[in-house]
Image (tube, rainbow, N blue to C red):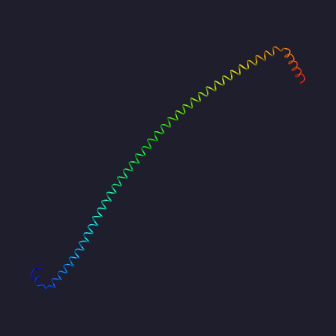
């Protein structure tokens, strides 16, 4: 509308126009506020999405660190297990060698004891045999008596 046309309008028309424009301006302000709110909400969502993406990346980093730590832990356990196995093999070998030495020493002691016992029994038997022979020789009369007793017994049994 031009300026001339506006001058021709009455006050009532002008007031009505002002009221209409005020209402239109009010509606436009509400729409603007809605648009601003939507933009703000979208920005929040974008920021949140960015934060979620960053959080996901950080969580992935945490998972990667946890994976690396667990891998290192497993490797340490494997190394410790290998070291314990090696120590166990060494201890087993040492124990076997010690047992074999003890078996040899025990066998040697047993053999020595048997040899000593055989020698002592042989000496004792020789001594007893000598004494019996001496006793037998000293008692010739007893020999004759014993032989007659055995002869009679044999004859009686027949």
Count of labels in the image = 0
On-image quarter of the C terminus = top right
Q: What percent of the width, then of the height, locates residue 46?
A: 29, 63
> Does residue 142 sit above or below 73 in this rendering?
above
> Does residue 95 sit above or below 143 in this rendering?
below
User: Residue at image x 39%, y 48%?
Assistant: 69
| Direction from residue 19 to residue 94 in the image, left or right | right
The extreme left residue here reads: 4
Q: Nearer the viewer, residue 158 or 116?
A: 116
Q: What percent of the width, then of the height, locates residue 30?
A: 24, 74
Q: Nearer the viewer, residue 51 or 19?
A: 19
- The quarter of the displayed image where residue 72 is located: top left
Q: What percent of the width, then of the height, locates residue 22?
A: 20, 78
| Direction from residue 26 to residue 59 in the image, left or right | right
- The quarter of the displayed image where residue 37 is located: bottom left
- The quarter of the displayed image where residue 17 is located: bottom left
User: Residue at image x 55%, y 31%?
Assistant: 98
> Does residue 143 sit above or below 62 in this rendering?
above
| Direction from residue 88 to residue 59 in the image, left or right | left
User: Residue at image x 31%, y 59%?
Assistant: 51
Q: What percent of the width, then of the height, locates residue 96?
A: 55, 33
């Amino acid at each position: 509308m031009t300026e001339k046309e506006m001058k021709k309008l009455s006050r009532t028309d002008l007031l009505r126009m002002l009221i209409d424009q005020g209402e239109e301006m009010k509606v436009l302000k509400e729409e603007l506020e809605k648009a601003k709110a939507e933009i703000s909400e979208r920005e929040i969502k974008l920021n949140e999405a960015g934060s979620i993406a960053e959080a996901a990346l950080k969580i992935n980093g945490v998972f990667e660190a946890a994976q690396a730590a667990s891998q290192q832990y497993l490797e340490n356990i494997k190394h410790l297990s290998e070291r314990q196995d090696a120590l166990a093999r060494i201890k087993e070998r040492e124990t076997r060698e010690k047992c074999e030495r003890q078996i040899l020493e025990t066998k040697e002691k047993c053999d020595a004891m048997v040899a000593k016992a055989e020698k002592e029994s042989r000496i004792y038997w020789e001594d007893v045999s000598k004494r019996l022979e001496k006793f037998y020789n000293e008692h010739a009369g007893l020999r004759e008596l014993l032989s007659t007793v055995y002869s009679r017994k044999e004859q009686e049994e027949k």
